Image (spheres, helix red, strand yellow):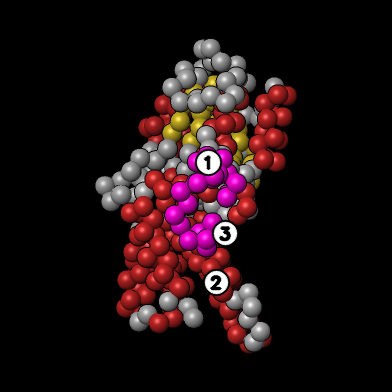
């Protein structure tokens, strides 16, 4: 599955499978691009008794993820799809030890869809497991989060990413991205750049605009805000990349005043990221406010 990093969490999840007494619901959370979905799929395969195999197409496995919208972003997960999946989860397995329902980008569920998933959480079938994956767990209702076993995943060290890419592609791994992107701890960035260089180039251009935000006019800042706020996951991704770059640029700053000002701004950016990831706040307004107070 080209999973890079997360060895400790994967070992722990393997022990849960081996124990044979898994919780009825799990919530995998962490930043975009770190491989949460891959780790969750590996866990699902273990629960189904087919470790190392692709669970897709198996009778006792179902995967829900947002479809692409007409604008090219992610559409929400609607109540009808979740209701059908809840029925699937309520039935006993046909051939595997358990039935597994995985909802990727679970924060994309509508309010009605989140209500629909509550019943199997409140009245779980002993042979079924629900796996939720989210980069914005705060957008998922507390009643769902409180009933789920949390599996937090974190950024991957640069050395681990390089090693993983070499394992996936050989020593001559086609890593045609700046070293800065490898330092961000997100293997998905590298795989995404290789899979869709056009999209990666657009992301890189937006990031360059962020780094020169102080030289942009207010009209240009608001135009940039409008562009990147069209997709909350995309906005979170870009802002997190920006924070990493700003920290790197200030690593050798000796002027106490400039350093204090820079870290106050970093707190503003990180606060905006938390707002976008963990709440249902209006993304355009949150990013507008950030850009109006930017350096």
265 relative to 196 in the view: left or right: right
Reply yes or no: does residue 210 show up in magenta: no
Which residues lie in the magenta part? 161-182
Q: Is residue 290 above or below residue 260?
A: above
- The spot of residue 170 in percent (x, y) is 52, 41
State the CA–CA distance, disc 2 to disc 3.
13 Å
Near mark 3 (Cα within 10 A), the count class, few <14, some 14-19 or many ≥20, is many
> Do callouts 3 and 1 mark residues in contact (Cβ within 8 Å)?
no
Residue on which disc 2 sits:
246
Residue 158 picture quarter: bottom right
- Expressed as whole percent of the image width and height from the top left, the position of residue 90 reads 52, 21
Q: Secondary structure at mark 1?
A: loop
Q: Quadrant of residue 50?
A: top right
Front residue (pair 242, 91): 242
The foreground one among 204 and 260 is 204
* Left or right: 106 as drawn, with respect to 262: left
Mark sitting on residue 170: 1
| Residue 187 percent location from the top left of the image | 53, 49
Q: Which residue position is annotated with label 3?
A: 183
- Please tell me how crowded label 2 is: few (under 14), some (14-19), or many (20+) other residues with Cα within 10 Å: some
Please tell me whether mark 3 sits on a helix, a strand or a loop: loop
Nearest the eye: 170 or 206: 170
**One can see residue 133 in this view:** no
Lower position in the chain sequence, tag 2 or tag 3: 3
């Amino acid at each position: 599955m080209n999973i890079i990093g997360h060895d400790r969490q994967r070992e722990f999840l393997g022990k849960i499978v081996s124990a044979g007494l898994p919780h009825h619901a799990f919530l995998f959370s962490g930043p975009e691009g770190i491989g949460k979905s891959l780790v969750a799929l590996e866990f699902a395969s273990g629960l189904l008794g087919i470790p190392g195999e692709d669970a897709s197409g198996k009778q006792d496995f179902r995967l829900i993820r947002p479809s692409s919208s007409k604008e090219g972003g992610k559409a929400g997960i609607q109540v009808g799809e979740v209701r059908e999946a809840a029925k699937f989860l309520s039935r006993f397995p046909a051939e595997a030890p358990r039935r597994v329902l995985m909802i990727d980008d679970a924060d994309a569920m509508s309010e009605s869809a989140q209500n629909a998933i509550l019943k199997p959480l409140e009245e779980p079938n002993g042979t079924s497991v629900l796996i939720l994956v989210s980069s914005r767990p705060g957008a998922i209702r507390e009643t769902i989060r409180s009933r789920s076993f949390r599996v937090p995943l974190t950024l991957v060290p640069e050395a681990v990413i390089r090693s993983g890419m070499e394992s996936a592609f050989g020593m001559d791994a086609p890593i045609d991205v700046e070293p800065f992107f490898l330092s961000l701890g997100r293997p998905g960035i590298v795989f995404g750049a290789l899979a869709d260089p056009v999209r990666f180039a657009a992301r890189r251009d937006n990031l360059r605009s962020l780094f020169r935000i102080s030289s942009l006019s207010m009209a240009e800042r608001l135009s940039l805000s409008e562009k990147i706020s069209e997709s909350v996951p995309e906005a979170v991704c870009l802002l997190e990349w920006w924070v990493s770059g700003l920290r790197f640029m200030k690593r050798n700053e000796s002027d106490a005043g400039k350093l204090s000002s820079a870290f106050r701004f970093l707190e503003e950016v990180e606060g905006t990221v938390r707002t976008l990831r963990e709440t249902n706040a209006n993304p355009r307004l949150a990013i507008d406010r950030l850009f109006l107070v930017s350096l």
